[in-house]
Image (spheres, rainbow, N blue to C red):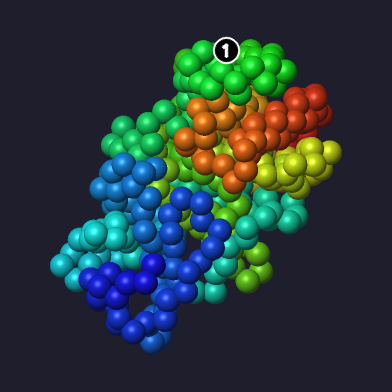
Amino acid sequence: MDNLKPILTAFGVNEDAIVNKISGGLINATWKVTDSEREFILQKINTQVFKSPEAIAENHCQLSKYLKHYQPDYPFVSEIPTVVGDTLFKNKEGCFRLLPFVKDSHTILVVQNPSQAYEAAYQFGLFTKMFEEFNTRALKTTIPDFHDLALRYQQFEESIRFGSQERVGECQQVIQQLKSFSYLVAEYKEFTNHPQSKLRVTHHDTKISNVLFNQQDKGICVIDLDTVMSGYFFSDVGDMMRTYLSPANEEELDFTNIIVREEFFKAIASGYLAAMGSELTAHERNSLCKAGYWITYMQALRFLTDYFSNDQYYGAAYPDHNLNRAKNQFILLQSMTDKDDLLKSILHSIE
C-alpha cells in the first residue's frame, strides 16, 4: 500500500518513518514501522474475515484490563490509540491499528525442534490459565462457529448436495474417506456436552508464528489475538498438533512427507500441561489426543467443502488446490489416528 502517511499521522507517528512490509500473514496486512528510536507494528484488519473490528478491539481492551489487574507482569501487546484516543483508525484504505514492537523478539514461521514446540505450547497454555477467573461470556465472538466440527460436517454434506456436481462426481473416493471418520463428530458432540468440558479464554489460532520468542528461543508471549474468544481447550491444542506434528504443511503435495513426529507431540502435551497445571479437568486431559484429530478433520472438511463451492473462501492458486489440501489433511489425520495408542501412552507418561 502506497499511502500510509495519513494513517501514521493519525497515530502520532512521523509520516517519514521507515515502513517495511512483513510477509507471512495470511489474513491481515502487516508492516514494521521505525520512527527514530521507536518501533511499531501497523496492521490493516481484514474485514472480509473479521466483520467487526470493533468487537476485536473491545475484546483486547477487556483482556488488557484484566491482565493489568491480575497479571501485571505479563507482556500483553495492547493497541496504541490514535491522537484522538480511538483504538482503530478507518479511512477509504481500510481499518488499521498500531501495536508496539516488542524489543529483542522474533517470530518463527516453521517449528524446527521440540523445544520450540514446548515453548509455544507453554505460552498458549499460560495464556488460557491466566484468564481462569475471567468471565468468558464477556468476550465478543469475532468469527462465529469457528471451530464447530458438527457445523463444518453439516456444511460438508450440503456442499456435496448443492456444490459443483462435476467436482463432487470426481471426488467420490476422498468423500468416502472423510465420511469414514464421521465418528469424530459424535465424539466432539459428546465432549462439548460433557459437564467437565469448560469454556475458556482460547486463542484459536496457535500456529508457531503467533508466539514471540526471545533471542534464546524462549517464549515471551502470544500475539495476534483477533481470534481470542470463548472456546474449548481442544481448539488450541488441536491446532498445534495439526501444524507442529508433521514437517510438511497443508500445501505439501508429496504426501509421503506427511508424518507424525512423536517427540513433537510430547513437547506440545508437556508444555501445555505444564502451564495449565491442574486447571484441565480429567475429562479434558483424557481428550487431549482427540483435540488434534478433531481440528485436523475439521480442516480437511473445510478444504473439500470449499473445493465443492468453487474455492470461494480459501481461494486457489491452481485448479485442484483445495482438493489437494483436503487430501493432505486427511493423510495427516490418518497418520495421527494410526498412532493413537502410542500418543496416548506418551500422554500418560507425562506427570
Q: Is residue 222 visible?
A: no
Q: Position of residue 24 (x, y in %)?
A: 56, 58
Q: Is residue 18 visible?
A: yes
Q: Position of residue 177 (x, y in %)?
A: 71, 18
Q: Position of residue 307 (x, y in %)?
A: 57, 30
Q: Is residue 235 above or below residue 46?
A: above
Q: Residue furthest left?
A: 84
At 68% across and 50% down in the image, what residue appears?
A: 117
Specify the quadrant of the image occupied by residue 146. top left
Specify the quadrant of the image occupied by residue 338. top right
Q: Residue furthest bottom?
A: 36
Q: Residue furthest right?
A: 256
Q: Is residue 48 above or below residue 311?
A: below
Residue marked by disc 1: 186
Q: Pick the residue in front: 315 or 59.
A: 315
Quadrant in which the N terminus appears:
bottom left
Q: Pick the residue in front: 248 or 77.
A: 248
Q: Pick the residue in front: 328 or 294.
A: 328
Q: Secondary structure at mark 1?
A: helix
Q: Is 262 situated left or right of 1 in this image?
A: right
At 29% across and 48% down in the image, what residue appears?
A: 53
Task: Tell me which amino acid carries mark 1.
Answer: Ala
Q: Is 281 situated left or right of 96 in this image?
A: right
